[in-house]
Image: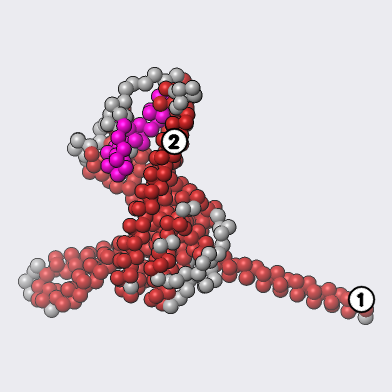
Amino acid sequence: MKPLYFDIRDIFRTPRLALSGKKIWVHLIGLALGWSVYFVLSYLALIVNGQSVAEIWSAHHLFPCLWNVNLPIVWYSWVIYSVGILLWVIIFMLASLAVSRITYKQLKGDEFFSSGDSFKYVKKHGTAAIMGPVSILLIIAFFLLMAIIAAWIAKWPVLDIIFLGLPYLLYFAGAVFVVYTAVVFVVSLTLSPAIVGTAEEDTMETVFQSYSTLWAQPWRLVIYEAVVGIMGLVTTYIYGYIIIISYRFFNFVFGQSWLMDGKLSRITEQASSYIYGANSPLTPFISKIYCIYTPASVGMMKPLYLTTTDTITTILITIALFIIGGSVIAYLLTNFSVGQSLLYVILRKKKDDENLIERKDEDELEEEDESEEISDESESDKTNNEDKDSKTNG
């Protein structure tokens, strides 16, 4: 790994570092877990709202969403649905922490740090990555609660002088702080996994670093985030187009008349319809981005005759296509996670003059402790052996 420049040039390494099977796999697992939780809770929300499973399936298939339901939605269905989205966000942040840790180890020269090792790190430090933004949100909630109490007291005569007139400038300063903290909350949502993954910070230090980074390096933060976002979108588009070309090439070869002929089209048309076709709400988005239109994508797919073996093959190919299609989204998320890691390492150097790459992490410190223990044990054994020899000679 080449040494870092600790400026914007390092940000342009993001797509290359993100193009890693190990990192994409971690985000793909997180994507699958998050989607599974979201899928179950979304269906539950619609069932609680009075719809049957058959109705939900015919309308939403594998991508349920309450926003496009042409029916009144009860408030507790929205609560269940919101919990599903929140859990998906938490799972994404934990996956981002794992990828940030892999990236950090790679920057330190450790290419053998595995996804399993990153999951162990998440198990140990994941709470800090989640509680950092939550703590900032609690700070905002506290100030809002104090403001509500003060406003309620100030509505009474005489008390308005004490609780509104005299401390007005203090309230205004508090309002500015709350607005600033709201921006810090957004920064913390994006940077917390990188802060914990690279600097091994706890919850309080994660909160402090979120405030400090925005205050000390606001323009670099904005510019670097914009560069990460633009590069992520461009490289993901290219990655997705390569996937589409590969899919078409595969179908071209297998679909020859002297090979699978129409059997392949029957199976793949049905399988792909759940990602790109009549059974997927993602179809308009994919068509608009990649300018691809097929009879199935515009809802012209005819009922297909599938044998028992065809049906089993269709199910297997559907799962495979979900993994392949999911890898495109996972690559986008990996770009984001890697970019945040590089971004924070650079900004930490800029604002604190601290090189996180050269700093010994907890793994290196543990190895040193173990080596010292082994050295002490060997010296102790050597001393004991010498004592025994001296007694024997005596």
Residue closest to the eye, 312 or 227: 227
Give the amino acid at mark 2: Phe
Figure check: 318 above or below 358: above
Q: Nearer the viewer, residue 339 or 215?
A: 339
Could you say which quadrant of the image residue 366 lies in?
Answer: bottom right
Outermost residue on the right side: it is 393
Mark 1 secondary-structure assignment: helix
What number is the disc on residue 180?
none
What is the quadrant of the C terminus in the image? Answer: bottom right
Up-down relation of residue 301 to residue 12 (above or below) = above
The x and y percentages for residue 354 are 45, 76
Q: On screen, 62 above or below 164?
A: above
User: Residue at 17% of width from left, 73% of height from top?
Assistant: 172
Where does the image place residue 305, in percent across and percent down from the top left? Answer: 39, 19
Instruction: Give the magenta range.
Output: 266-294
Q: Is residue 278 above or below residue 145?
A: above
Q: Which residue is mark 1?
A: 392
| In front of the other: 164 or 237 | 237
Q: Which residue is mark 2?
A: 249
Check disc 2: other Cα within 10 Å, few if <14, some if 14-19, many if 20+: few
